[in-house]
Image (cartoon, rainbow, N blue to C red):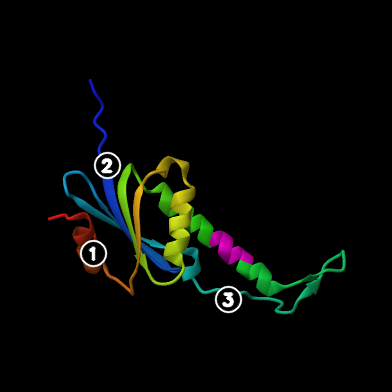
Amino acid sequence: MKKINIKNRYAIWIDHHKAIMLCADAGGNLTEEDMLSPLSFSGKYFGEETNKINSSGHIVSNESHRQHKEENDFNGFLKHIVAKLNQPEGLLILGPGDARHELQNAVEKEKSLKGLTLENRPADKMNEFELTSAMKAYFHLS
């Protein structure tokens, strides 16, 4: 028996606080998933707010430590999104700012997604209905 390879089409709206992922299967059925970024939670840290000097005499900046942690958390969020792409045929990435470019870079680094048709477009805040309309127009879905 020959295995049928069904491809899915995806549209993702992303910013640094959340992502909305839509998937259209070969039958035209749409599924939606909302994902919150680790950066969507408040970054309040309790305790010392001053820089510290470590044992080797270097100044340890709390701000640079916080930025490094946020960058690592967001990169983990991007990897989580890329892992959810199941046999993609095409991908439409929408969103404001740098988050959509960072997602595009994460997708392009994934070896299993080489040759994926990808479109990256700027878009302001979108809800599920607006994302669905953009996806249907881009992929010519009915």
Q: Is residue 125 above or below residue 114?
A: below
User: 115 or 9: which is nearer to us?
Assistant: 115
Question: What amino acid type should be assigned to the residue bearing mark 1?
Answer: Ala
Which residue position holds label 2?
7
Residue 47 is labelled as: none
- The residue located at (67%, 68%) in the rendering is 65
Which residue position holds label 1?
134
Q: Of the residues under marks 1 and 2, which one precedes in the sequence? A: 2
User: 115 or 82: which is nearer to us?
Assistant: 115
Magenta span contains residue 32? no
> In the rendered structure, which segment of residues is drawn in magenta?
68-73
Residue 11: image location, x then y, percent: 30, 57
Left or right: residue 142 compared with residue 98: left
Residue 44 is labelled as: 3
Q: Nearer the viewer, mark 2 or mark 3?
A: 2
Q: Is residue 115 above or below residue 61?
A: above
Disc 1 secondary structure class: helix
Q: Nearer the viewer, mark 3 or mark 1?
A: 1
Residue 78: image location, x then y, percent: 46, 56
Question: What amino acid type should be assigned to the residue bearing mark 2?
Answer: Lys
Left or right: residue 11 compared with residue 60: left
Q: Given contact means CB atoms under 8 Å apart, are the residues at marks 2 and 3 in contact? A: no
